[in-house]
Image (cartoon, grey):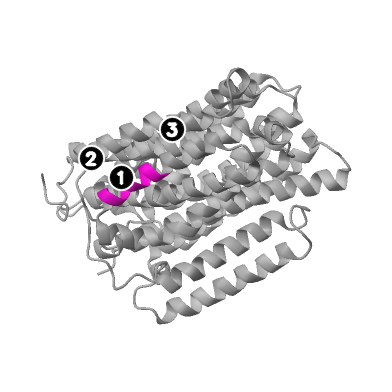
Amino acid sequence: MPNPSSPEQPPANLGTTRRTRLTAVIVACALFMQNLDSSVVATALPTMAKAFGSDPVRMNVALTSYLLSLAVFIPASGWIADRFGARNVFRLAIVVFTIGSVLCGLSDTLAALVASRILQGLGGAMMVPVGRLLLLRTAAKTELVAAMAWLTTPALLGPVVGPPVGGFIVTYLDWRWVFNINIPVGILGFVLVTLFVQDVREPPRGRFDVRGLLLTGMAMAGTMFGLETLGRGVLPPGVSEAMLIAGIIGTVGYVWHARGHPAPLLDFTLMKLPCFGVAFTAMMLFRTGIGAIPFLLPMMLQVGFGKEAVESGLITFASSAGALCMKPAAQRALRRFGFRDTLIWNGALSGVMLALCAAFRPTWPAAAIYGVLLIGGFLRSLQFTAYNTLAYGDVSRARMSAATSLYTTGQQLAATVGVSAGAVSLELARTFSGHETPLPMDFSVAFLVVAALTTAAAPVALLMPKTAGDDLTGRHSGTNEDGKTVAAAKPEA
């Protein structure tokens, strides 16, 4: 096998090598399992709420607890992958995630479900960033756009098939099967990683930052659960406020700690890199708005419109189908228009399409709803491909694990905030309107709030030069043997 420190170069047409494609597809099997799980659970929440005797709106804790677990444990993923080998950690993550799925299916109370989702999150916290790290260390610079498409295309099958599968399961079978379907996928992923994926590692950067993990965990858990429960009557008075204060203390404490630590878990000095800094900042805003969709859309269709879960799933899948259609065109679009212009105009259009969801009503023709969701998913997919590729364009190999940890932590944090923002907006709209059960107009308010967050990401791209990322696509000039162009932003030494 080729040495991972010297990835074989792709063909001159900026495609991908066989080794890169194989690694991307195998890693995507695990991401397929995770994305399938998230979309199936979102569709099944109203039915699960009836089984647990809980308010459907407050069932979003089943989504938030998982996302929060990801955000708490992801910072440690880069160091652990370097210490024990990315392949070993990735395989173990698949096992933990699968066991967590089994326990979710055995849960009889909401508390047990939340605890099992947290265990799932621990597995996912290693699975997502370490899988991406395996691919980043396998692919050459000029392969990154195509490699990310190869990675995310199979993974996007999860959200495509998840809503209809989830709707079918909770309509005709027991809701517990929404978790049991992860078992065969987990076994297959483990076998494929063992047989075909290389063990790629770098020497760890110093000792493990235990204090940093504790502080980031305190910051994430306190802030997220504080925001999630504030003013909702879920916890005793004062508990939500205390958690928010703890989150703020943890955040300040970690920032102070990281300034003096030689190898912090989350290395904020990466924000000084032009491509990484802009991509990370814009991605956080964009993903916050988009992160609310898996919660708001199925809830609106089932609770607001009164549709069956299977009907909701068949409609919701259109958004992910649109994302799947974009992947083959992503590299051509970025090469033609460049990263900056794509992120500005495509980001603005994505916000508009999300805002159109606020106009959905039960009287809308199904074709019109499908059209909005399909186009919106198409645009959002291009935006995420651009962010996920550009972020690593100027990161050196030695800092790739640190960059992956920070970027993936930001992704999950933004998704968690998105679910909370959607739930809080919906709760406030319902409270002010005096509706015991959310009506379509209440969902409209929530969609407009998250659409504003999504649209705010577009102007951030103005901070980057027009030539940013040109070396990743070969735009405007030919590439040399290292896959770089004179016009593009130079990677760090």
Q: Given contact means CB atoms under 8 Å apart, are the residues at marks 1 and 2 in contact?
A: yes
The N terminus lies in quadrant? top left
Disc 1 versus disc 2: distance between alpha carbons?
Answer: 8 Å
Query: What range is drawn magenta here?
Result: 87-96
What secondary structure is found at the residue carrying circle 2?
helix
* Neighbours of disc 1 within 10 Å: few (<14), some (14-19), many (20+): many
Main SS class of the magenta portion in the image:
helix
Q: Residue at x 51, y 53 (%)?
A: 69
Disc 2 versus disc 3: distance between alpha carbons?
Answer: 18 Å
**Residue closer to the observer: 383 or 312:** 312
Q: Is residue 89 visible?
A: yes
What secondary structure is found at the residue carrying circle 3?
helix
Q: Residue 212: give x, y in percent of width and height.
A: 44, 71
| Mark nearer the N terminus (1 vs 2) | 1
**Vertical arrangement, residue 353 with respect to residue 321, above or below:** below
Q: Residue furthest right?
A: 434
* Neighbours of disc 3 within 10 Å: few (<14), some (14-19), many (20+): many
Name the residue tied to disc 3. 182
| Three-letter amino acid code of the residue under disc 2 | Thr
Magenta stretch holds residue 93:
yes
Residue 91, numbered circle: 1
Q: Residue at x 43, y 52 (%)?
A: 125
Q: Residue 49: give x, y in percent of width and height.
A: 69, 35
Q: Residue at x 31, y 73 (%)?
A: 207
Q: Residue at x 65, y 20 (%)?
A: 366
| Three-letter amino acid code of the residue under disc 3 | Asn
Q: Is residue 316 left or right of residue 444?
A: left
Name the residue tied to disc 2. 194
Residue 187, numbered circle: none
Magenta stretch holds residue 187:
no
**Residue closer to the observer: 490 or 200:** 200
Q: Residue 127: give x, y in percent of width and height.
A: 38, 47
